[in-house]
Image (cartoon, rainbow, N blue to C red):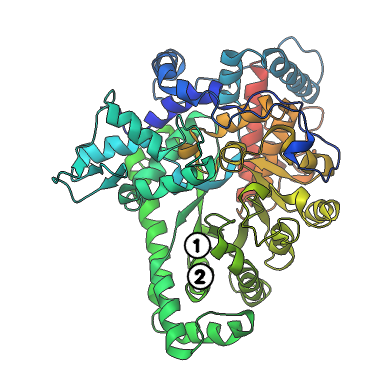
Amino acid sequence: MRSSIGFGLAVVLSLLGIQACGGSDGASGAPSTSNDADSSTDAQPEPNDAADAGQDALQDAQANDAQEAGPDGSAPDSGGDADPDAGCTGTPAQCAHEAEARTADRLGLIEDDESQLTAFLRDMPKGGDLHHHLSGAVYAETMLDWAQTEGGYCIVSSSLSLGTSCGSSTTQPIPNPGDALYDKVIGAWSMEGFVPSATQSGHDHFFATFGKYGAISGTHHGKMLADVMQRAASENELYIELMLTSNSTAQTLGQNEWSAHHDSASLTAADLPTFYGELEASSGLAGAVQAVLTDVSQSETQARQILGCDSAQPMPGCSVSTRYMTYISRSGATPGVFAQMVASYEAAIQDPRLVALNLVGPEDNTGALSRYDVEMAMLGFLYSTYRVTNLSPLHVSLHAGELAAAYMPSSYDIGTIDHVRKAVQIAHAERIGHGVDALQESDPQGLLQQLKQNNVLVEICLSSNAQILEVSGSHHPLGDFIGYGVPVALATDDQAVSRSSMAGEELRAVQDQQLGYLQLKRMARDSLEHAFVPGASLWQSPDTAVPDCDPDTTGYLGQDPPPAACAAFLATSERAKLQWELEQRFHAFEAAQ
């Protein structure tokens, strides 16, 4: 069997060159209100054009890994000891600028060479992944390996789901690579090889995957976190914010407390102050809070043990910083949803590693659509209760605008529901996940201006947008966000389901959105600028560092060690430390080009 840690990476590298959508005419930088697929003559690529070739490319990718990877399995050396002044007669800052320009030129020269582009993007520093579902992050191959190694699991023949009641005629043993069943399971648990049909769309297949392997993903958070951290390190990634934990304890508490005190079936915005008081007075709230704290603590502790982070020889994944979110199903009954939100705010008071909450699940589900406004009201109420009063540090990042007209129920109009606007204005979301329908909301230009003015970052998930919503190329709003100055950052969403990674998302950005090196670099920087980590920023404006760290004629951004005044500033800010580390990695990467 393959090694459990890092096997997903080999699959990623075999897919990087085939995961991108086909050609497009580029991402528009000009404001536009049109997102009508029929209004363009662009060829619309299939969301998984070459995904079928993934297994064929696996052996070649693994061979390349063995030749190029370091002895510890980390990414190849990108030239960290290179001298930026070699061949340059200017100041260190001028030489660093020349190296940046040379790197940007190189990407332009190799963008049509799949092999070189893949290696370039794998090694390029990536900042942070801010939209990352742990439940969709570990490759199906890895989970099958775990299931077989641990024992007690089988495949339910009718659904290709992972089961624990085995030995009957309705189940089969965990298959081995090369078995026909093995490939079928991989396809059922991910978008590998998926071709939309009259009976199942990419949208439906994507969301159906999670329940098929839940028997193992729901109980292996620490092991999954270690796998994710190791893969991130192999792609020169610094930071991940993971949607780690849901809270069935709080869900049940909310339902029970509501039933005990109220006759109506559902919670409304007018009920929030009273119901909040009832939850606060409940003896069960402490247990709901502890459920979150326990999952965060146990998951991180186990991941660090697996990676040997406190040993003399820690694995590369230990270099990746992590923070965590709670995730709440937006289709759940409203009292339980509200109780989960309250428990999240309370838990964040006790553990700073818990930084945010998010609502998850198909946004176009009829139940989710019907509850959207009251859920925004819940978050608005809790913002006033906890954030305005500085009672809890919990942030809010929301899936909003992960919508396409083709998948909307007939009773809803995508042009009037304004999910992104409500997430920002009512729920006080600091980041937006997806935002794909932003140009179809009422007053889209006004919305984009508000996102810029409020400094709300949009988490861009190109692979899942193509696979779920069939939105890609010039139909994707990424170019419009950039054109309006809305901060954006690439993210993986459910990287294993999509058969992608951060490098894979960059590949889509280059090939499908025609982005260049400097824009990729800007997005990497913005990911850390908008990460939910404490401390002042390294940047006083997008391209100017704070005075203590702004390079003069004798230095450059990311120099090691930093100047004394800068080192003193970095010691006061976790955010600035991460940002300086990113600049150090960019400096080394660019010097090597």
Please indicate, yes or no, whether residue 560 appears anywhere in the rendered image: no
Query: Dot 1 corresponds to which residue?
Result: 328
Q: Residue drawn 74% across and 45% down?
A: 487
Residue 3 position within the rendered picture, expressed as x and y whole percent measured from the top left: 30, 29
User: In the rendered view, does 190 fall on the left or right side of 155?
Assistant: right
Q: CA distance from mark 2 to mark 1?
A: 7 Å
Please indicate, yes or no, whether residue 278 appears anywhere in the rendered image: yes
Vertical comparison of 61 with 154: above or below? above
Is the C-beta separation of discs 2 and 1 under 8 Å?
A: yes
The kind of secondary structure element at disc 1 is strand
Task: Please state which of residues 50 and 521 is positioned toward the viewer in this rendering.
Answer: 50
* Residue found at the very far top of the displayed protein: 87
Residue 71 position within the rendered picture, expressed as x and y whole percent measured from the top left: 39, 20
Vertical comparison of 382 with 83: above or below? below
Query: Dot 2 corresponds to which residue?
Result: 337
Amino acid carrying label 1: it is Ile
Who comes first in sequence, dot 2 or dot 1? 1
Quadrant housing the C terminus = top right
Residue 359 position within the rendered picture, expressed as x and y whole percent measured from the top left: 55, 60
Classify 10 Å Cα crowding around label 2: few (below 14), some (14-19), many (20 and above): many
Task: Please state which of residues 323 and 449 is positioned toward the viewer in this rendering.
Answer: 449
Task: Please state which of residues 229 and 465 is positioned toward the viewer in this rendering.
Answer: 465
Classify 10 Å Cα crowding around label 1: few (below 14), some (14-19), many (20 and above): many
* Residue found at the very far left of the displayed protein: 167
Q: Residue drawn 43% across and 85% down?
A: 259
Q: Residue drawn 64% across and 50% down?
A: 403
User: In the rendered view, does 544 fall on the left or right side of 157?
Assistant: right
Q: Quadrant of residue 274?
A: bottom right
Q: Residue drawn 47% across and 28% down?
A: 12
User: In the rendered view, does 172 fall on the left or right side of 489?
Assistant: left
